[in-house]
Amino acid sequence: MRLFLILAVAFGLSGCMEVPAGAEKPAPGEPAQEKAPVKPTRQAALMFVSVAKAIEPVAEAQCRELSPKTNCDFKIVIDDKDGGEANAHQFLTRSGRPILLFNYALINDARNADELAFVMGHEAAHHIAGHLAMQEINARQGAEVLAQMASVNGANSREIRDARKLGAALGALRYSKDFELEADELGTVISLRAGFNPVIGARFFGRIADPGDKMLGTHPPNSQRIALVRRTVRQYRQVPGE
Ligand SMILES: [Zn+2]
């Protein structure tokens, strides 16, 4: 079940937007994984705070409008422990409060406020659309299906356990690309309503390694995401009163 190990490492349940660190190299003799987080400049940190202040109330209003039964009390947090590549993701606290977490590298990589706003809108949209819960259901169903298949085929308990884990990883991938596109669309609206330009914001995708259209990929091709952002902006501007 080596495939499972690769899949499990590649696709976390809550992981979302990851950007390669680009040309940045670790210090001589220092492994890349153990790099200390590079603190953002004061200017970058101030930009992050001002974007968060603008996005948070708009995301909360959008959440209350579209998902009135959801906890819409977003908390936007910087992860000062994560020294890895640029990353943002969304998760819930035990009490169900939605947290949007951004590491230093993402803040350093953003070239302008529009890019930061777009990523924040995108992460908030995952929560508003209930993607994490749906992904967990898909993972549970995938685990059951593969465990049953293994059991029917006479697998031993260890093999059944492995099959369950593989099934969970594959299940979590179900609709993954659709979830990303949905989050891009709603993220575009949040970003627009907060006064940012999502077309400029989506240029961020141009710097992400294009995942292409891989069958087991978690994210859609960049060109598809950018086209969707442009289309959503056009539609939004055509709605009277917006
Ligand atoms: Zn996402």
Image: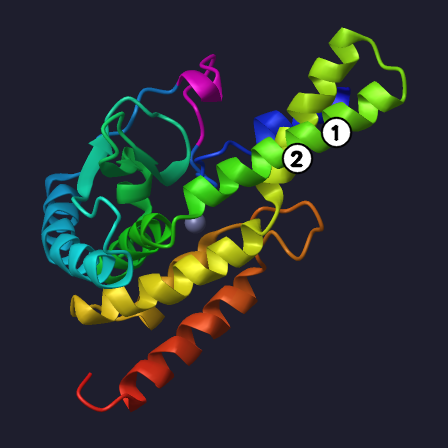
Q: Which residue is located at x 22 percent, y 63 percent?
A: 65
Q: Are marks 1 and 2 in contact (CB under 8 Å)?
A: yes
Q: In this view, does 146 lie above or below 173?
A: above
Q: Is residue 190 left or right of residue 227?
A: left
Q: Residue 146 carries which label?
A: 1
Q: Which residue is located at x 26 percent, y 71 percent?
A: 197
Q: Is residue 125 left or right of residue 192?
A: right
Quarter of the picture containing the N terminus is top right
Q: Is residue 202 above or below residue 166?
A: below
Disc 2: which residue? 142
Q: Residue 186 carries which label?
A: none
Q: Give the spatial CA distance, label 1 vs label 2.
A: 6 Å
Task: Name the one closer to the observer, 222 or 3.
Answer: 3
- Asked if residue 5 shows in the view, the reply is no
Q: How crowded is mark 2: few (under 14 residues within 10 Å), some or many (20 or more)?
A: many
Q: x, y (%) of residue 219?
A: 55, 51
Q: Main secondary structure of the magenta part?
A: loop
Visual colour scheme: rainbow
Q: In this view, does 41 lie above or below 66?
A: above
Q: Which residue is located at x 25 percent, y 62 percent?
A: 114
Q: Element under label 1?
A: helix
| Mark 1 residue type | Leu
Q: x, y (%) of residue 62?
A: 22, 62
Q: Is residue 108 left or right of residue 223?
A: left
**Residue 33 on the magenta segment:** yes
| Mark 2 residue type | Gly
Q: In which quarter of the image is residue 113?
A: bottom left
Q: Quadrant of residue 184?
A: bottom left
Q: x, y (%) of residue 143?
A: 65, 28
Q: Element under label 2?
A: helix
- Asked if residue 168 shows in the view, the reply is yes
Q: Please report the bounds of the magenta region as a residue range.
A: 25-34
